[in-house]
Amino acid sequence: MDQIAETMKAEGIEPDIKTQAIMARHYVSGGLKEKAEIVLKEMEGGNLEEHRWACQFLLPLYGTLGRGDEVSRLWNFCKESPRLEECVAAIEAWGQLKNMPEAEAVFELMSKTWKKLSSKHYSTLLKVYANHKMLSKALCGSRGSGKADSILNKAAQQNQMKPMFSSYMIVMEKYAKKGDIIFHRMRQAGYQARSKQFQTLIQAYVNAKAPCYGMRERLKADGLFANKAVAAQLAQVDAFKRTVVSDLLD
């Protein structure tokens, strides 16, 4: 990477901000934090007003470096008249720092500033929760409300585009671990049934140690057949399966 940069300079080619961002990511992944920060300062150019569009790259990179002070400085500059890509970058940055109150505050600002967000923007906060194993917090907000569920519902209600399938699956998998279900939300959003959804739904019953009635019929109604994995799950939650105790009682 250093050789490429030197060759470019020797030939009079100045790397643009996107190229510099790639270089910085390379240094960060290699543990070369000092070199990464030098590149980040070059991207800023000593004047944020003139190089404002670099903020969308700088924010998540500083977040990866653990530089909360720099993330705070850049976001304070941007939030007076925020741009959509800066909000997304700030959510990612605060997520890297595991500062969820700040990430949530940016999301709220973004939601109020732009009335029509795409599913990609609603997914940003969910991905932050999931990537840092904090989705359980999103699922259990104050008074037991599900923040993550609310984010998806809001996205579905306010936009003609439905939330991404992967977003629903992230939340559904986490709900399953708590014995909860979000299966019907996907139906409301217009998704057709898939085996993966049923697997996650059945796992919710497995985790809750509760019998699961009529699941085979629901699979058939949706034109699906239980594969080996689903069949094994169904065996665990079969309400009418015979056990040693039931045999003794007969």
Image: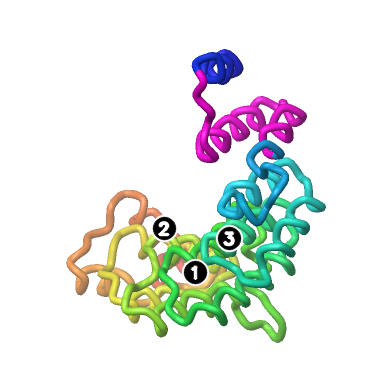
User: For the residue labelled by badge 1, is the local secondary structure a helix, a strand or a loop?
Assistant: helix
- Of residue 26 and residue 132, the one placed in the foreground of this image is 26
Position of the N terminus, as image quadrant, is: top right
- Residue bounds of the magenta highlight: 12-40
15 is within the stretch colored magenta = yes
Left or right: 138 with respect to 171? right
Numbered mark located on residue 232 in the image? none
- SS at badge 3: helix
User: In the image, what residue occupies the spot 74% across and 64% down?
Assistant: 76
- Observer-nearest residue: 176 or 58? 58
Q: Which residue is mark 3?
A: 86
The answer to whether 227 appears left or right of 113 in the picture is left
Q: Quadrant of residue 20?
A: top right
Percent of width and height locating residue 33: 74, 31
Q: Nearer the viewer, mark 1 or mark 3?
A: 3
Real-space Cα distance between discs 2 and 3?
44 Å
Q: Position of residue 229 (x, y in %)?
A: 36, 51
Q: Position of residue 79 (x, y in %)?
A: 67, 69
Q: Gap between marks 1 and 3, in whole Å? A: 14 Å
Q: Is residue 143 above or below residue 207?
A: below
- The image quadrant where one finds the C terminus is bottom left
Q: Are marks 1 and 3 in contact (CB under 8 Å)?
A: no
Residue 84 in magenta? no
Most extreme residue toward the right, as rendered?
A: 69
**Which image quarter: residue 64?**
top right
Comes first in the chain, label 1 or label 2:
1
**Residue 159 visible at all:** yes
Residue 128, compared with residue 212, is above or below; it is above
- Position of 65 relative to 215 (above/below): above
Q: Which mark is residue 122?
A: 1
Q: Name the element at disc 2.
A: helix
